[in-house]
Amino acid sequence: MLRIGFDSSPLLPGHPPGVQRVVERSLEALEQRGRIEVVRLTPDSPDELRSWRQRELPRTVRERGLVGIHSFVSAFAWRGPGHRVQTLHEAPWRHGVHENADLRHRFWAWAGARRASAVITPTAATARDLGLTSGRLAGRTHVIPWGVGLPFEGEAPPNSMDEILLGKYHLPDRPLLLCPGAVRAKKNLRATLEGLAHLKQSGSLPVQLVVTGPDTPDLRASLGLVQRLGLTRHVSTPGEISDADLAGLMRLSCAVSVLSTSEGFGLPVLEAMACGTPAIVPAGGALEEVAGAHAIVVDPTEASSVGQGIVQALDTREELRTTLTERASRFTWGNTALSIEQVWEGLA
């Protein structure tokens, strides 16, 4: 059995929730399958991360007889024995986004990809953004989609009712439009707000927008825009909520709007589909790739296009429910784990 070290440091506080979900669910699936031996490796403190990764990990490979180190992020041990597998989630600088686009991230995306034994991206769109689909790098690049699992499913759990969440979070009894985690500028909440404002100006605003996630400066800036657009009564911000409640709100919603300026995969799109709820996504790129043929595709730069997408969601949500859950069922963490195993078996 192959013995692989997995850099589990993204599970430490401070890493994006989406990346943490990918790491934890992938490791759980690998451990459950038992096809390779998973050795979780984590520094004692986030403050030691850089030196731990460059000094301690190579020593660990030697001392524990590991085939190599699997990194769920772009950074990995630059020198040392064994194979190195790198994960590149997105290339935000290709889309004019400054978040996670500093020189260090760009360095790892460029130089790291040329030094790693293999590179994983979650979508073909991300591989294209990073220039990994041609030449020598194409042979070492693997597109491995992320998965979805419980609590994201088409029906509420036994002895549970999603409608209870309306009272819990003080939401009106009308169609909901959900923007999960849209509390950072790159999530482009503005596009959804302007789409709602367009509908309001047209004489009808049939939905309540629900934005989940912690209070951030970017969210406060967006709430200022809410006030200027006259949408205060139509926007709710329940804060951070559990995955179980998020799944329930997804099932209650007419659509989940994910109009990020840059995204390498878009877990909320997949989670929405697993709940039988359509996703409103930008044309082209990773989000449309994940959502597939039944995505509601809009132009985020045109408020009228976003508004039309919201109306389309209201009209088609019920008829799409079964098709969406069927598509989401193809994306499992077990499949993610299988693909990771195949990468390592090809290197060993």
Image (spheres, rainbow, N blue to C red):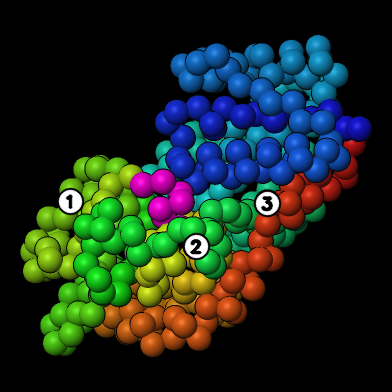
Magenta residue check for 201: no
Q: Earlier in the sequence, mark 1 or mark 3?
A: 1
Identified at 26% across, 74% down, the residue is 174
Q: Secondary structure at mark 3?
A: helix
Q: Give the amino acid type for the residue marked by disc 1 in the picture.
A: Ala
Q: Which residue is mark 1?
A: 221
For disc 2, the neighbor class at 10 Å (few under 14, some 14 to 19, many from 20) is some
Q: Nearer the viewer, residue 150 or 69?
A: 150
Q: Position of residue 142 (x, y in %)?
A: 73, 53
Range shown magenta:
241-247
Q: CA distance from mark 1 to mark 3?
A: 36 Å
Where 232 sits versus 296, above or below?
Answer: above
For disc 1, the neighbor class at 10 Å (few under 14, some 14 to 19, many from 20) is some
Identified at 36% across, 52% down, the residue is 181
Q: Position of residue 182 (x, y in %)?
A: 33, 54
Magenta residue check for 244: yes
Q: Position of residue 160 (x, y in %)?
A: 45, 58
Q: Give the amino acid type for the residue marked by disc 3 in the picture.
A: Trp
Where 215 sits versus 67, above or below?
Answer: below
Q: Which residue is mark 2?
A: 156
**Number of marks in picture:** 3
